[in-house]
Image (spheres, grey):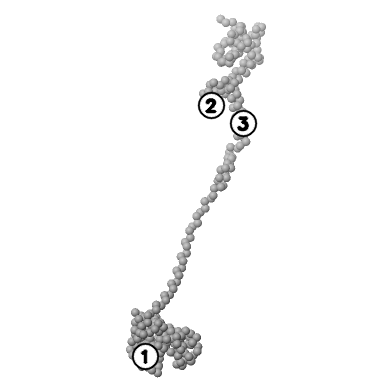
Amino acid sequence: MRNDGTLDDQHGLDGSIDRSDDDCFTVRSTGSLESATPRRFSLGSLRTRSGKLANPLAARPGRTRLAVATGAVCCLGLLGGGLIGAGGNDRSETPAAAQEIAQRAVADAASRGMARQATDPSTPTADPDVASAATAQPTPTAKPTPTAKPKPKPKPKPKPKPTRIAPVAGLDQDQMNNATTIVRTGRDMGVPRRGLVIAVATAMQESNLYNYASGVLPESQNYPHQAIGWDHDSVGLFQQRPSSGWGAVGDLMKPAYATRQFLSALLEIPGWQDMALTDAAQAVQVSALPWAYAQHEWRATEVVNAVLG
C-alpha cells in the first residue's frame, strides 16, 4: 500500500509542487496528452515536504504554468480542428503553423467585421456600370400611326373636240364646219331631224353657209367672219338684222347663237313639220324670194345625214 504522505511521482514535472492532484490530464514535456490516473484525496497529500499542511487554495507556480500551457494547447487544438474541418484533411500542420493560421484568421475576421460596419448591408450599392448602361439604353418610341393619304382629286376630263366632218354635197370645209354647227346645235335643243334639214337649207340660201359680216354695219366686221355682204344690216349665217330684233351684232355673228334664234322661231310656227320646206323657211325669214329655199332640200338632207350618221 502506497504512503499518502509521499509526494514523489514518477510522472510529475518538478516534484510535488508541480503536480496537480485534481486535474484529470497531465501535460508531458513532449507535448502529448495522457489520461492521468485518479487519485485518492487525503490530508496527507496536502502536506508539504516539511510536514506542514499546505493550503489548497494557495497559488502554486507549477500549477499556474501547467494551467496556462493546458489552456493554450486547448485553444490551438480547437482552432486547428476548426481549420482542418473547414479547409480539408491536411493533418501535416505543426502547432506553430496552426497558431499562425489562427492569428491570421483572427485578423481576417476583424478586418471583415470592420468592412461590414463601414457598409450598411441594408442599403444596396449602385453599380455605376449598370446604372450608366441602363441610362444609355434608348427608350423605345411608339411607331407613329400611318395616316391615310388623301386620294388625289380626279382631273376633269377635257371636253372632246368636235370631230371634223368631211365635206359632202359639194361644200368646202368652211361650209361643212358651219353646217355641222347648225346640226349639232339643233340636236342639243331637241329639234327633230326635219327641223335640222330646214335650218341647213335656209342657211344655204341666205349666206351659202358662210359667216357674213355687213359692209353697212362696220361693227360686225370686228368679229370673226368669212365674207362681207351689203344687204342692209343683215349679218351671220341666216342674214338676221339686229334692227329687226334678232339680237345684238356680236351675238348674231356667232353661228351657234344665230342657229338657236332661227330654230326657236321655227318651233313657234303651228304645224311647221307638215309644211313644205320652202313654206316653213319663208314663215321664219319673210324673204322676197320665198320659193328659193326648196332647191337646197336634197343637199341639206345629205349634210344632216353625214353629221348625225
Q: Residue 271 carries which label?
A: none
| Kind of residue indicated by mark 1 | Tyr
Mark 1 Cα-neighbour bin, 10 Å: few <14, some 14–19, many ≥20: many
Q: Which mark is residue 293?
A: 1
Helix, strand or loop status at disc 2: helix
Comes first in the chain, label 3 or label 1: 3
Mark 2 Cα-neighbour bin, 10 Å: few <14, some 14–19, many ≥20: few
Q: Decide: is 256 above or below 132.
A: below
Q: Where is residue 84 in the image (x, y as percent from the top left)?
A: 54, 24
Comes first in the chain, label 1 or label 2: 2
Helix, strand or loop status at disc 1: helix
> In this orientation, does residue 78 appear?
no
Quarter holding the C terminus is bottom left
Q: Where is residue 282 in the image (x, y as percent from the top left)?
A: 38, 92
* Disc 3 to disc 2: CB gap under 8 Å: no
> In this orientation, does residue 83 appear?
yes
| Kind of residue indicated by mark 3 | Ser
The residue to which callout 3 is attached is 111
CA separation, marks 1 and 2?
140 Å
CA separation, marks 3 and 1?
137 Å
Given residues 78 and 206, the one toward you in this image is: 206
* Disc 3 to disc 1: CB gap under 8 Å: no
Q: Residue 87 carries which label?
A: 2
| Kind of residue indicated by mark 2 | Gly
Given residues 47 and 275, the one toward you in this image is: 275
Residue furthest bottom in the image: 288
Q: Where is residue 33 in the image (x, y as percent from the top left)?
A: 56, 15
Of marks 3 and 1, the one in the foreground: 1
